[in-house]
Amino acid sequence: MTRISVNVDGTTYQDDVEPRLLLAHYLRDRLGLTGTPIGCDTSNCGACTVDLDGATVKSCSVLAVQADGCAVTTIQGLAQDGEWTALQRAFHEQHGLQCGYCTPGMIMAARDLLRENPHPGPDEVRQALEGNLCRCTGYQNIVRAVLAASGQRDTSGHQVGEEVPA
């Protein structure tokens, strides 16, 4: 067992974990954060995308011990006080989901894009999301949702994708 300390969605956890435990399984099984789905366990689908110290990663390809000393943001850590972010609202309003399985990963990847490029074009959105698979929507409404969210502000007044101090 290896002792880790990880800040997840603003809360610091200290746990003993097996060195082979994947971050996705740590989040879901140990912390109960089931908003991060596991679609493939092989880093192919992107459903398990989370933010690790400011960069998006597929949590099924990162060991929990690699997150030691890091900050992790999951889909469950985005909404503040029950208020959706502008990006989450845009996915809802633009019907950017059907079954919803890919949605957490899509939103996390889109959040990363909007942090880097607040006003992307459709091709830039498609390129940023190409590592995230959706089997239901054909991507049109997902791209439309990201474009709708670009430039919007959250109810807190923060730019979409902007890190909000805890």
Image (cartoon, helix red, strand yellow):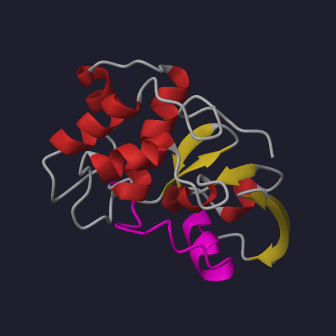
Q: Does residue 157 lie above or below 2 as drawn?
A: above
74 or 98, which is in the foreground? 98
Q: Does residue 77 lie above or below 152 as drawn?
A: below
Quarter of image, res 21? bottom right
Quarter of image, res 142? top left
> Percent position (x, y) of residue 54?
66, 37
Q: Is residue 124 magenta?
A: no
Residue for point 23% across, 51% down: 95
Q: Report whether 118 appears left or right of 94.
A: right
Residue for point 74% across, 61% down: 65
Residue for point 50% across, 62% down: 60
Quarter of image, res 164? top right
Q: Does residue 146 lie above or below 63 as drawn?
A: above
User: Is residue 132 at all visible to an observer of this figure?
Assistant: no
Q: Report whether 146 appears left or right of 17.
A: left
38 or 157, which is in the foreground? 157
Query: Magenta span covers which residues?
Result: 22-44
Q: Report whether 35 appears left or right of 32.
A: left
Image quadrant containing the N terminus: bottom right
Residue for point 58% across, 41% down: 155
Kindly report the secondary structure that dominates the magenta region of the rendered protein: loop
User: Is residue 42 at all visible to an observer of this figure?
Assistant: yes
> Percent position (x, y) of residue 40?
35, 66
Q: How many marks?
A: 0
Q: Is residue 23 magenta?
A: yes
Q: Report whether 107 appears left or right of 123.
A: right
> Percent position (x, y) of residue 139?
19, 44
